[in-house]
Amino acid sequence: MAEIRTADIVLSLTGRDRGQLMLVVAEEGDFLLLANGRARRAENPKRKRRKHVSLQGPCDERTRLKLSGESRLTNSEIRKALALWTGDENAN
């Protein structure tokens, strides 16, 4: 099982958000704080157990540096990071 870190992109495997891609904005022990910039915003992330998600890969380097510097991400930046990773240029 791959280690999931802050600034990684994960796929939700359980719950109402099953099948959604989310960005790990913080870690709390065995829990991850996830946001997608829409349903789960940066200011109100979803708290989810690591075992309930699947690691997809790292987000872009700029977003990773911003998170590691403990800067606040905007909801728009989260959406753009996910869109860049999936190749969906039409996402705003």
Image (cartoon, rainbow, N blue to C red):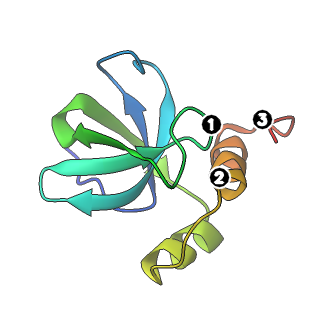
Q: Please provide percent x and percent y for residue 84.
A: 72, 48
**Residue bearing the label numbered 1:** 38
Q: Disc 2 and disc 1: Cα gap in Å?
A: 7 Å
Q: Please provide percent x and percent y for residue 71.
A: 53, 78
Q: Is residue 51 above or below residue 24?
A: above
Residue depicted at 19% across the width and 48% down the height: 31
**Residue bearing the label numbered 3:** 88
Q: Which of the 4 quarters of the picture holds residue 65? A: bottom right
Q: Disc 1 and disc 3: Cα gap in Å?
A: 15 Å
Q: Label 1 crowding class (10 Å Cα cut-off): few <14, some 14-19, many 20+?
A: few
Identify the image quadrant of the N terminus. Answer: top left
Near-viewer residue (24 or 3): 24
Label 2 close to label 1 by CB (< 8 Å):
yes
Kind of residue at disc 1: Arg
Q: Is residue 50 above or below residue 11?
A: below
**Residue bearing the label numbered 2:** 75
Q: Disc 3 and disc 2: Cα gap in Å?
A: 16 Å
- Determine the secondary structure under disc 1: loop
